[in-house]
Amino acid sequence: MKKRQKMAVSAPTNEVLFARIVTILEDARARVVRSVNSEMVLAYWYIGREIVE
């Protein structure tokens, strides 16, 4: 039976890890802003419709 060689998987450096985390958080914030903006536009549209009616 052959011995399996362990493949070295290099862990990301602290800087790379930090940059990836920052990117994840920035992307999440951007999605939240778009979602809130969409909901506010919809709310204003409903308010306008109520005023017109």
Image (tube, rainbow, N blue to C red):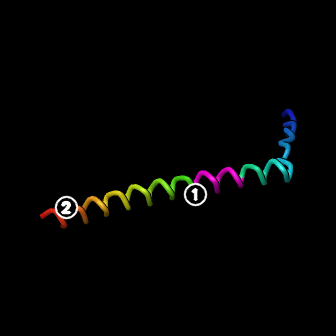
In the rendered image, the quadrant that contains the N terminus is top right
* Name of the residue lying farthest toward the top: 2
Residue closest to the eye, 25 or 36: 36
Residue 29: say if magenta.
no
Residue closest to the eye, 10 or 38: 38
Q: Position of residue 53 (x, y in %)?
A: 12, 64
Residue closest to the eye, 26 or 51: 51
Tell me which amino acid carries mark 1: Arg
Look at discs 1 and 2 and give the one toward the viewer: 2
Q: Report the magenta residues as a range.
A: 21-28
Q: Position of residue 38 (x, y in %)?
A: 39, 55
Could you give the CA–CA distance between mark 1 and mark 2, rounded to whole angstroms?
A: 30 Å
Q: Which residue is mark 1?
A: 29
Q: Main secondary structure of the magenta part?
A: helix
Q: Residue at x 57, y 55 (%)?
A: 28
Residue 25: say if magenta.
yes
* Name of the residue lying farthest toward the left: 53
Q: Residue at x 72, y 49 (%)?
A: 20
Q: Residue at x 19, y 66 (%)?
A: 51
Residue closest to the eye, 29 or 52: 52
Q: Which residue is mark 2?
A: 49
